[in-house]
C-alpha cells in the first residue's frame, strides 16, 4: 500500500497550488517586494547528486525593478507554497539570487527576465575555504562540518556509517569536504564494504543517506502510464473526476537512458578493478567489483538483475584504474580507498542503467530519494482470451528511485518532471518468454 496521502477532498483538479508568497529582499535586506502577481514561472530543482537546491524564476513586469531595487544578483528570494490539504508539509525556504539572464523588452513599458537562485548554504559554501584536520566516524564528520560551517535553518538527517577516517582539508569548500567524507561512509553490519552514501538537499531538509536504506523504504506512491480516464462512475450513470488517480497518471514519459552496454562497461557498471599501490611498502593490492558475482551481496530496488546472468565479459574486464594508497599514514586509520572506490563507482553507475523522465502533477510531500512504483503497460496487442485485461511489463514496471525533480510552478498550477532510475527487475529475465 502506498504511503502518500490520498488527495481529493478540497482539491477541484490535480496540480492545484496554494501559493503563499514569493518575496524578493533587496541587497541590504531593508526592503521587500512581492512577486506573486508578476512572475510567469518558477522552476525549483532538487537532485540526489547535488548538495543544494537551485532554481529560476521568470518575471514579466513594468515597474523596472532591475533599476529600482536594484537587482544586482545578490538579493534574497523567499518562496512559500503548498499543495492544498497538505499544509503539514509546506515548502518555505530562502534563496540567494545569483544571476540575471535572458533580459528582453516586450514593448516600451514591459520587460521579461530570468533570475537564477541557489540555496543560501550554497553561497556560504562558495565563500568558505577550509584548512582543517578532521578525524573520526565519516558520517559524524559530515554532520560536524554541516553544523559548524553551513547550517542556516534546516537540520541534517543522517544515516550512521561504519568507517573511521582522517584527512586534512587542502582549502576545500565545506561541500567538498562533505562530499569527500560521504564517499568514505560505509554501511554498517555487512560482510563487505558498501560505500553507497549520498549527501543532498530535498525540498524538506539536507540528508546524508545510504542507497541501501533508500532502497529498503516503503513505496511512497504508484504511478501509471496508461489511458485511464481517471473518472469515478456514479450509480446514476454520471461520472466525476478521480483526483487521486489524476495525481497518479503520467502525462508524458521520456526514455533518458537504457540498454547502453558499451557505455555501462566503460563506466565500470559491470566490472571495476582498482590496483592499490603502496609506494612506501612497495606493495600492490587488487580490488574488484563484478556484477555477476557481487550483485546479491548488496541490496537493490528489486530482486533480479537487469542483465543476463551470463554477461559477455570476463570477471576482470571493464573499468581498470590504479590509486596511490597510504595505510601507514595515520596510526589507527587504515586506507581503504582502493576497495571503496572499486565498489562505489560500480554501485552508483548501476543507478544509470535504466532512467526515465516522468511528467506528473506536482505535490509538496514528495522529494528526491523516495521510492515509487511505476506501472507500464506491455506494448503489445491484447489477445482475445485475455478479455481486455491490461498486462504490465514484467521487467520495467516495479520499484524506482527518484533521483531528480523539477518543480514547475505557475500562478495556479504545480507540475513536476521526475527523473527515476532502477538497478534491478522484479522478475528474472526470461529468454524463452513468448511475444
Image (cartoon, grey):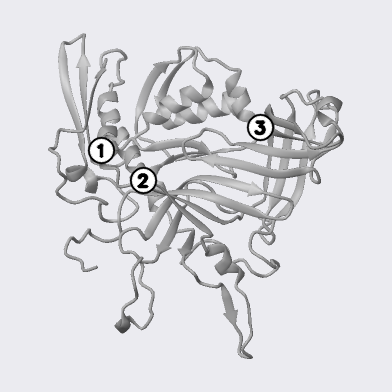
Q: Secondary structure at mark 1?
A: helix
Q: Tell me the CA gap for discs 2 and 1.
A: 27 Å
Judging depth in this view, the residue of 73 and 434 nearest the camera is 434
Judging depth in this view, the residue of 201 and 236 nearest the camera is 236
Residue of label 3: 116
Left or right position of 69 against 245? right
Q: Tell me the CA gap for discs 1 and 3.
A: 37 Å
Between circles 1 and 3, the one closer to the viewer is 1
Residue of label 2: 212
Left or right position of 123 against 267? right
User: Mark 2 or mark 1: which comes first in sequence?
Assistant: 2
Instruction: Name the residue located 16 percent from the left edge and 18 percent from the top edge.
Output: 284
Q: Secondary structure at mark 3?
A: strand
Judging depth in this view, the residue of 283 and 431 nearest the camera is 431
Between circles 3 and 2, the one closer to the viewer is 3
User: Mark 1 or mark 3: which comes first in sequence?
Assistant: 3
Residue of label 1: 262
Amino acid at each position: 500500500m502506498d504511503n502518500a496521502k490520498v488527495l481529493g477532498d478540497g482539491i477541484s483538479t490535480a496540480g492545484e497550488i496554494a501559493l503563499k508568497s514569493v518575496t524578493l529582499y533587496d541587497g541590504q535586506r531593508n526592503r521587500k517586494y512581492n512577486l506573486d502577481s508578476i512572475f510567469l514561472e518558477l522552476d525549483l530543482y532538487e537532485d540526489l547528486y547535488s548538495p543544494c537546491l537551485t532554481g529560476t524564476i521568470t518575471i514579466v513586469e513594468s515597474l523596472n525593478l532591475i533599476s529600482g531595487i536594484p537587482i544586482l544578483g545578490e538579493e534574497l528570494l523567499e518562496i512559500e507554497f503548498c499543495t492544498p490539504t497538505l499544509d503539514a508539509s509546506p515548502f518555505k525556504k530562502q534563496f540567494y539570487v545569483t544571476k540575471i539572464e535572458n533580459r528582453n523588452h516586450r514593448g516600451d513599458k514591459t520587460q521579461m527576465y530570468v533570475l537564477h537562485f541557489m540555496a543560501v548554504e550554497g553561497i556560504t559554501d562558495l565563500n568558505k575555504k577550509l584548512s582543517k584536520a578532521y578525524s573520526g566516524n565519516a558520517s559524524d564528520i559530515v554532520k560536524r562540518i554541516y553544523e559548524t560551517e553551513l547550517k542556516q535553518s534546516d537540520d541534517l538527517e543522517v544515516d550512521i556509517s561504519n568507517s573511521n577516517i582522517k584527512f586534512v582539508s587542502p582549502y576545500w569548500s565545506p561541500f567538498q569536504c562533505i562530499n569527500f567524507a560521504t564517499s568514505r561512509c560505509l554501511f554498517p553490519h555487512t560482510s563487505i564494504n558498501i560505500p553507497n552514501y549520498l549527501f543532498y538537499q530535498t525540498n524538506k531538509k539536507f540528508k546524508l543517506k545510504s542507497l541501501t536504506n533508500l532502497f529498503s523504504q516503503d513505496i511512497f506512491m504508484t504511478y501509471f502510464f496508461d489511458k485511464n480516464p481517471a473518472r469515478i462512475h456514479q450509480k446514476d450513470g454520471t461520472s466525476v473526476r478521480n483526483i487521486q488517480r489524476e495525481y497518479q497518471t503520467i502525462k508524458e514519459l521520456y526514455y533518458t537512458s537504457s540498454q547502453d552496454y558499451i557505455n555501462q562497461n566503460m563506466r565500470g557498471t559491470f566490472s571495476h578493478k582498482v590496483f592499490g599501490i603502496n609506494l612506501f611498502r612497495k606493495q600492490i593490492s587488487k580490488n574488484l567489483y563484478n556484477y555477476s558475482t557481487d550483485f546479491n551481496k548488496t541490496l537493490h530496488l528489486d530482486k533480479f538483475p537487469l542483465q543476463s546472468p551470463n554477461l559477455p565479459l570476463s570477471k576482470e574486464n571493464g573499468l581498470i584504474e590504479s590509486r596511490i594508497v597510504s595505510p601507514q599514514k595515520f596510526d589507527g586509520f587504515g586506507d581503504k580507498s582502493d576497495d571503496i572506490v572499486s565498489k562505489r563507482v560500480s554501485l552508483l553507475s548501476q543507478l544509470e542503467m535504466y532512467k526515465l523522465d516522468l511528467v506528473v502533477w506536482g505535490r509538496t510531500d514528495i522529494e528526491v530519494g523516495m521510492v515509487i512504483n511505476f506501472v507500464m503497460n506491455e506494448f503489445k496487442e491484447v489477445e482475445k482470451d485475455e478479455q481486455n485485461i491490461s498486462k504490465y511489463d514484467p521487467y520495467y514496471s516495479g520499484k524506482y528511485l527518484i533521483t531528480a525533480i523539477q518543480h514547475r510552478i505557475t500562478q495556479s498550477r504545480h507540475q513536476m518532471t521526475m527523473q527515476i532510475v532502477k538497478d534491478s527487475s522484479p522478475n528474472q529475465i526470461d529468454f524463452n518468454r513468448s511475444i
